[in-house]
Image: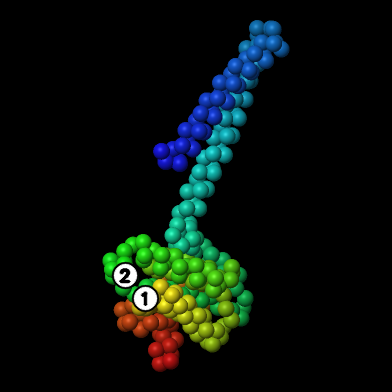
Amino acid sequence: MPKSLVSAVRISILYCVFSALWIVFSDKALSWMIHDVALMSMAQTLKGWFFVAVTSALLFILVSKSFYTIESLNQVDGLTGLVRYNAFKEELDLKIQNRHADQVVMVMYLDFANFSVLNQSLGFEVADSILASFAKRLKSLYSADVSLGRLGPDQFSIAMAIENDSEQIEEAINQLRQTFDTNARVKQLDLSCALGVAIEPSDGHSATLLMSAATTALNKAKNENSGVQFFNKELSKQETER
């Protein structure tokens, strides 16, 4: 029997036991304390409403907890432990709002090249282990103030606030690519990736615009097999020349 069904049965049994005990003992207590018929009728009514209030409160707690669990599962990817699209977008909006005047918010989208072929040749379990190990390396590479997400089957997202300096931007890209290469080397696989980069404020002032820009840059990198593409055409030209 599934664990969820077992838990539901247990809760139902506990509720039945509690209800039965409440009815038996509360009736006995009232009959022992009250002998007036009119007063007994009023007490029974109050007792009934009290029972409804208590059970409604318990039901509210259980339902709220269930909805919170469901929402948490929807926000976090089960395989990698990274946040999904909506949660990443919320974190990115906060980064944009809280960045310092001398900073920019950099968003990098990374996509495994030909991952569907890898799935078919190695099997889904092995492919999933590659994704999970890469996510683990990302978590060890970046501090807690960097947002990490899994937005697609083989697409990862990274967002960080850094100094508005071209060398730091280049260093961040190189770090990510080296992490990817290290993970592929450890798995003894010949893998490559495509990177799409968008930078706030030049590429957009909101998470929606910035993520759209990163998607555009990533698609261009995949189509042109160029490795890295910036949404900003001039930066992409400089990266290609470099």
Residue 36 location, x and y as percent? 69, 7
Marking on residue 118: 2
Residue drawn at (36%, 75%), measured in percent from left and top?
189
Res 120 → quadrant: bottom left
Left or right of residue 142: residue 26 = right
Question: Foreground: 68 or 20?
Answer: 20
Residue drawn at (50%, 33%), measured in percent from left and top?
10
Residue 158 location, x and y as percent? 49, 71
- Give the class, few, some or many, for how many residues have Cα within 10 Å of label 1's Cα (few <14, many ≥20): few
Contact? badges 2 and 1 (CB < 8 Å) = yes
Above/below status of 220 relative to 55: below
User: Which residue, given by chain and number where applicable, does mark 1 sit on?
Assistant: 189
- Spatial distance from mark 2 to mark 1, Cα to Cα? 10 Å
Q: Three-letter amino acid code at disc 2?
A: Leu
Q: Three-letter amino acid code at disc 1?
A: Leu
Q: Secondary structure at mark 2?
A: helix
